[in-house]
């Protein structure tokens, strides 16, 4: 279906729904002494869609406690990330009201909210009868909750507008490295782009046949662009889109974008895996943990799970450092991802769904998820100050220090728009083709990409 016709149909449908339906205000009962009542929605059954993740595993372990506290019955499914978002998209588009709650990233919520599938969480947060007194919303890491707010206007930055979800955990991007490899080759940890390229040359084959210098994602999907590539891209001063004359215009072929992509392609050719074009976050982590890769540039919480005692062959040899910059002392810039929970706007059990969100984003639960379930990064500020957390992370050298050096300049670096997955997947495909030599130059490849991205968003009117 033509996208312009599709968007018009969606808008008409939303108007009809708004005019033809009234939504009762969801209000929790209070006890006789005016206290918040966890049993307000007792007897309700809700359905939850979860992605396979440490945060989901922690939730599952506490569902019985939630059911006992609230009287709400929980049905859930857990799905690998590779097929998870297709499942959620199909369920939401059905309009059936199932699932009531679903895990999501911020990028997906741009798409889902544009189609009218996502409830505004402020509906509940601003109703004192619906919020337990010890919830302490101010304790959230600000970037975690701001990443999940958006006005719905393509091109507008995150941080204002509807609150589309609440965070469970988040990640920033940094460099993990094998201390043994660097000691073996008598190398310093790279702090600049040029130093990184020289280290790539030195570390190819460092641990025998097929071992290599740096693991980065390369699969033909959106996930390849958002970690290291987008972090470097923004640090070089490049933009994905800008608003010009009321339209989104791609800038992926700017001089800054070309220069950065030339560097990134050079890094892959000099230091990457021969199987780079198939690599997801999972492959990068496994190669670091097995001693195939000497460096991983990816989410900070990815290599962590290769470095807990006994978790991999290289556990205990992995440390963390900030992403390299153009010159020593430049600010470290990182993209941002958060796993969050959102409420289906078609849910028939929104009160109970909100109770689920509130319970599983509480300080008590998220502290448990971090300390006992290894769900990282903690999105409650108080957890970072806990002596137990600081002690736990001592086996991850450089992790907390690198996080502190990175978080100040960390935010979602993409321009919010409803065709994010189409444009970013095309970006990853073009990057693959550039590395494979299918274009005469990086400039030619990015010129071609710009045309495709402009075409993808051509029907967005601002």
Image: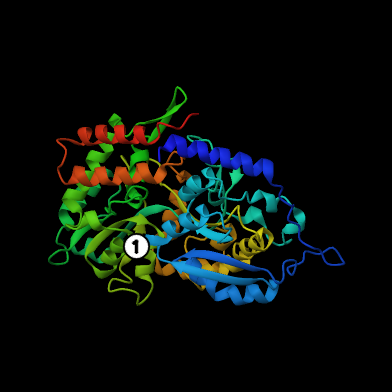
Image quarter in which the N terminus is found: top left
Residue topped by disc 1: 319
Horizontal side, residue 117 vs residue 211: left or right: right
Residue furthest out toward the right: 32
Which residue appears at 42% of the width and 38% of the height?
Answer: 3
Horizontal side, residue 411 vs residue 137: left or right: left
Residue 332 visible in this rendered orientation of the protein: no
Give the percent coordinates (x, y) of residue 441.
17, 35
Give the percent coordinates (x, y) of residue 110.
49, 45
Residue 171 visible in this rendered orientation of the protein: yes
9 and 381: which is toward the camera: 9
Horizontal side, residue 122 vs residue 427: left or right: right
Residue furthest out toward the left: 209
Which residue appears at 13% of the width and 67% of the height?
Answer: 208
Which residue appears at 44% of the width and 38% of the height?
Answer: 415
Q: Quadrant of residue 311?
A: bottom left
Q: Secondary structure at mark 1?
A: strand
């Amino acid at each position: 279906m033509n996208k312009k016709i599709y968007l018009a149909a969606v808008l008409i449908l939303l108007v009809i729904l708004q005019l033809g339906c009234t939504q009762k205000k969801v209000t929790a009962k209070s006890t006789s002494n005016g206290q918040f009542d966890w049993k307000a929605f007792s007897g309700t059954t809700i359905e939850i869609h979860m992605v396979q993740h440490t945060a989901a595993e922690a939730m599952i372990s506490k569902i019985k406690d939630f059911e006992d506290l609230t009287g709400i019955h929980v049905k859930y499914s857990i799905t690998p990330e590779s097929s998870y978002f297709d499942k959620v998209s199909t369920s939401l588009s059905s309009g059936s009201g199932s699932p009531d709650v679903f895990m999501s990233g911020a990028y997906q919520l741009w798409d889902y909210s544009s189609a009218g599938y996502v409830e505004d969480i402020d509906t509940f947060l601003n109703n004192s009868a619906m919020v337990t007194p010890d919830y302490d919303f101010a304790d959230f890491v600000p970037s975690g909750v701001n990443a999940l707010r958006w006005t719905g206007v393509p091109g507008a930055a995150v941080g204002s507008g509807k609150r589309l979800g609440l965070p469970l955990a988040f990640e920033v991007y940094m460099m993990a490295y094998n201390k043994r490899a660097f000691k073996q080759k008598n190398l310093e940890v790279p702090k600049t782009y040029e130093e990184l390229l020289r280290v790539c040359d030195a570390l190819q084959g460092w641990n025998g046949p097929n071992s290599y210098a740096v693991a980065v994602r390369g699969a033909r999907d959106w996930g390849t662009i958002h970690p290291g590539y987008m972090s470097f891209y923004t640090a070089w001063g490049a933009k994905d889109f800008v608003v010009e004359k009321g339209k989104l215009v791609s800038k992926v072929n700017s001089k800054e974008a070309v220069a950065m992509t030339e560097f990134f392609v050079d890094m892959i050719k000099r230091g990457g895996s021969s199987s780079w074009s198939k690599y997801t976050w999972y492959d990068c982590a496994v190669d670091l943990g097995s001693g195939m890769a000497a460096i991983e540039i990816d989410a900070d919480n990815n290599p962590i799970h290769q470095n807990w005692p006994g978790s991999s062959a290289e556990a205990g040899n992995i440390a963390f450092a900030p992403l390299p910059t153009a010159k020593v002392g430049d600010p470290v810039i990182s993209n941002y991802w958060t796993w969050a929970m959102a409420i289906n706007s078609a849910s028939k059990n929104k009160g109970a769904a909100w109770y689920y969100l509130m319970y599983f984003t509480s300080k008590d639960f998220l502290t448990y998820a971090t300390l006992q379930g290894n769900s990282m990064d903690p999105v409650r500020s108080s957890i970072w100050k806990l002596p137990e957390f600081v002690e736990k992370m001592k086996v991850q050298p450089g992790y907390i220090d690198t996080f502190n050096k990175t978080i100040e300049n960390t935010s979602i670096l993409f321009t919010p728009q409803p065709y994010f997955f189409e444009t970013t997947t095309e970006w990853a495909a073009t990057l693959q083709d550039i590395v494979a030599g299918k274009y005469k130059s990086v400039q030619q490849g990015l010129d071609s990409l710009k045309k495709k991205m402009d075409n993808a968003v051509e029907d967005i009117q601002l």
